[in-house]
Image (tube, grey):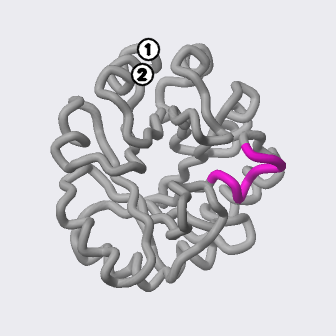
Amino acid sequence: MSVKVKICGITNLADAQVAIEAGADMLGFVVCEASPRFVTVEKITDIARQLPPHIVKAGVFVNPTEELVTQAIAGCGLNLLQFHGDETPDYCLQFGVMSMKAFRIRDVESLKALLNYQTDAWLLDAFAPGERGGTGAKFNWDLAIEAKKFGRPIFLAGGLTPENVAAAVRQVQPFGVDVSSGVESAPGKKDAGKIRSFIQAVRSVS
């Protein structure tokens, strides 16, 4: 099965369309005001209305209120909820939509937290002090291989670029890869050429 490609941090329709045309499977929308890639529920709703139905739309949250998540699901037609904060296992599972918990991986001890979360998938990102994601830093991919042994789909994130993603896919063989800053010209603005190169690199090995 080919590796799923998720382009995260989409802030406008043009970038969404480029990603879809290049072959992305999933788009991520950051519903967190502290992020330079923040988009409002209203903006996501407008973008989502113009996307083809087969594209998975993920809402990316950091310690959100239940009301915000519910509003985003209803308005944006989200297929996947991605949690990057201190959300509890029960919190992640309560909304009746596929969920994915993100973990910032520093060492093998970091993997123990995964087992507490029975979400549909786990996203493994690099640890960076004070940051929740989108840092462009990578972590030891051998730890992702260890995480796969726990039996849940793994999305590999953190420092992926068009130049290194093929090697990452070959080494880890994840269920999916997630990229944001690695295909940007500036925070929140995607680079069409980088998106195409990134997806082509993934498809060349999966």
Q: Which quadrant, please, contains the N terminus?
A: bottom left
Give the number of the disc on residue 75. Answer: 1
Residue at horizontal 73 percent and vertical 54 percent from the top:
183
- Residue on which the image places disc 2: 72
On the image, the x and y values in percent for residue 206 come to: 53, 67
On the image, the x and y values in percent for residue 5 come to: 54, 52
Residue at horizontal 72 percent and vertical 40 percent from the top:
188
Residue at horizontal 68 percent and vertical 74 percent from the top:
164
CB under 8 Å between discs 2 and 1: yes
Q: Give 117 or 203, whichever is nearer the viewer.
A: 117
Q: Give 2 or 173, whichever is nearer the viewer.
A: 173
Rounded to the nearest angstrom, the CA distance separating label 2 from label 1 is 5 Å
Residue type at numbered disc 2? Ala
Magenta stretch in the rendered image: 180-187
**Callout 2: SS:** helix
Tally of numbered tags: 2
Residue 72's quadrant in the figure?
A: top left
**Callout 1: SS:** helix
- Indicate whether residue 185 is drawn in magenta: yes
Residue 45's quadrant in the figure?
A: top right
